[in-house]
Image (tube, grey):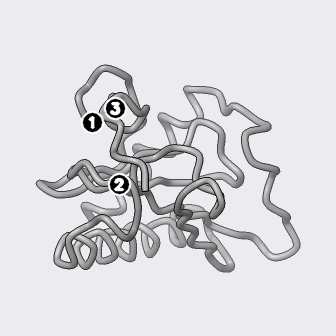
Amino acid sequence: MPSYDPNNIFAKILRGELSAHKVYEDDKTFSFLDIMPRTPGHTLVIPKAPVRTFLDIAPDDLAHLIKVTQRIARAAVKVFAADGLTIQQFNEPAGGQVVFHLHVHILPRQTGVPLKPPATFKEDSAVLSDQALKLAAALKG
């Protein structure tokens, strides 16, 4: 398997070299909105540790990542009045991974509304900022 690339886009976000619409952060995880969302509220949850895939993360860190994902997913259902959720996680190119830093997608879903195709729509920054603030507030409340 290839090694972790410290210059991937998520590593740059973690170092503050690139901006992101932050939803949540703790000592082990960071969560932010996808700038090319497949649905309103499309959120990414990543470990702060430099891990490429699901197979590379320490079990305790994976457990924490999943707990945070679940917490954010619950808030997303409320904030976006979702009828359901799609949770996705891809590993290596053959598995559909595009950014090689472990990440989990949270996609709030509405009945009868299909997902937008991947990487086809870049959301306006003001919309993402508003959504991130609403999600962050729901996590605090």
Quadrant of image for the C terminus: bottom left
Give the residue type at disc 3: Ile
Residue under label 3: 13
Whether pointer 1 and pointer 2 mark residues with C-beta atoms closer than 8 Å, the reply is yes
68 shown above or below 53: below
Residue 83 marker: none
Whether pointer 3 and pointer 1 mark residues with C-beta atoms closer than 8 Å, the reply is yes
Residue 46 marker: 2
Furthest toward the left, the residue is 27
Residue 14 marker: 1
Residue 118, position as x, y percentages in the image: 74, 48
N-terminal-most mark, 1 or 2: 1
Q: Residue at x 25, y 79 (%)?
A: 63
Q: Residue at x 35, y 37 (%)?
A: 5
Furthest toward the top, the residue is 17
Q: Secondary structure at mark 1?
A: helix
> Counting other residues with Cα less than 10 Å from the Cα at mark 2, is it few (<14), some (14-19), or many (20 or more)?
many
Give the residue type at disc 2: Ile
Give the residue type at disc 1: Leu
Q: Residue at x 41, y 33 (%)?
A: 8
Quadrant of image for the N terminus: bottom left
Q: Secondary structure at mark 2?
A: strand
For the residues labelled 1 and 2, the Cα–Cα distance comes to: 9 Å
Residue 115, position as x, y percentages in the image: 79, 60
> Counting other residues with Cα less than 10 Å from the Cα at mark 1, is it few (<14), some (14-19), or many (20 or more)?
some
For the residues labelled 3 and 1, the Cα–Cα distance comes to: 4 Å
Q: Secondary structure at mark 3?
A: helix
